Amino acid sequence: MTRMNGKRHSPSPLLCRKAEREFHINFEGFIRDLGERGYSPVAVRSYGRAAEHFGRWLCENGIRPCRIVPIHLGTFLRSHLPRCRCPNPGGKSICLCRAALGCFIGFLRRSRILPDQPKIQVVLTGADRLIRAFDQHLERVQGLSATTRRARRRYARELLVWRFGKKPLRIRAVLPRDLFRFVNVQARTLKATSLHALAVGLRSFLRFLELTGRIRRGLAYAVPSPASPPPRPPARVLDRPARLRFLRSFNRGTSVGRRNYAIALCLSELALRANELVDLTLNDVDWRSQTVRLRQTKQRRERLLPLPSPVARALAEYLQRGRPAAAHRAIFVRHRAPVGQALHVDGVRHMIRRAFATCGMEAMGPHTLRQAWATAAYRRGTGLKLIADILGHRSLDTTAPYTQVHIEELRQAALPWPRNRA
Ligand SMILES: [Zn+2]
């Protein structure tokens, strides 16, 4: 008899035996799955013991594997583990058990024993509906990227919460002085760059409200303009010898080294953003025409880039002699457990920073390689417009800082001022 959800109940012995039998079959599958996904023997053992402990507890409560719901995990982790008196329970660390049970539930879902996570029905408030409409406008009409839209949604919500709290939303009651006060309150905690972005975001939200007839015209002009943020310090320049030293530092004798070298070359020769790199799939490379197609770019426009031979060779070498078998089409995948899963953008950042540190240079992120490519292309005489196209920038203003255009260089390039002969 066990206490579950505050109620006492004793499951029938028949149900317990059925649960035990089903759990046993799934447990063996789970251990096999961990091994196949590249988990180390130590991890397989400790995750297995945690899953076995959870399974025993489920069986005692007559819960079959197909009947597991999130509350069972919570009760096991928070109520059972701290008071566990089971004989030989395995690890009792909550962190380890949470990780292990996350994997176990994932396995049950992949094996179709548990249904996919049900969509939670959320009751939307007036503010939620308004912000959802604003987001759709930003996406469908303005074509903004997910990152920009997320920031704009946040600013709009902060304004609504500050102005209305839990009271009903009366958007027409927003006055110019409210906007002035709101920006002033935010100015106490925000840095100049964030404050500038807040003002831009608020104006965008107010213009959307105007456009859809929710407020009177002109309120967007009432958002105060904070002082411009100070100019960014010039980006660190990576010259050609340093770039070559960095690229030569990868150990291409191992499969991970071949993967990391191909990544570094893609960042450095194709000037990709880290998230564009992790989104690359096997279908995006056209070996015959030596091109690579970027589908999920920040500007939501497809870009077709030429694939230089050294990059194509590094990619082919990785695909033939490095990439582990994976169920999906991402080019760059994990070589450690869970093996074969698409590489995450943070993994790429971390790897590049570590590679810079290994060759005795200041640890810099993937963006440095993109910037180094732009600077080198500009110095070779490539036009700013072409560089902007390759980098996927909409505006040349965004591209100019990448090319490290120094004022002294501009001064030398400028035409001599005509002298007044009179
Ligand atoms: Zn226990």
Image (cartoon, rainbow, N blue to C red):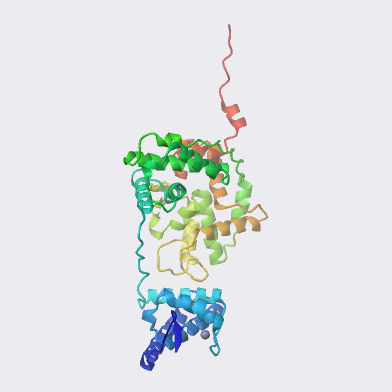
Above or below, 256 against 309 in this view is below
Quarter occupied by residue 257:
bottom right
Q: Is residue 117 left or right of residue 189?
A: left
- At horizontal 59% and vertical 13% (from top left) the residue drawn is 419
Which quadrant of the rendered structure holds the N terminus?
bottom left
Q: Is residue 347 left or right of residue 241?
A: left
What is the x, y in percent for residue 249?
62, 57
- Residue extending farthest bottom: 13
- Residue extending farthest front: 167
Above or below, 95 against 236 in this view is below
Q: Nearer the viewer, residue 243 or 165?
A: 165
- At horizontal 36% and vertical 71% (from top left) the residue drawn is 116
Q: Is residue 175 visible?
A: yes
Q: Nearer the viewer, residue 48 or 405?
A: 48
Above or below, 220 against 330 in this view is above
Q: Nearer the viewer, residue 394 or 181?
A: 181
- Residue extending farthest top: 422
What is the x, y in percent for residue 206?
40, 40
Q: Is residue 383 visible?
A: no
Which quadrant of the rendered structure holds the C terminus?
top right
What is the x, y in percent for residue 402?
54, 41
Q: Nearer the viewer, residue 352 or 263?
A: 352
What is the x, y in percent for residue 178?
46, 40
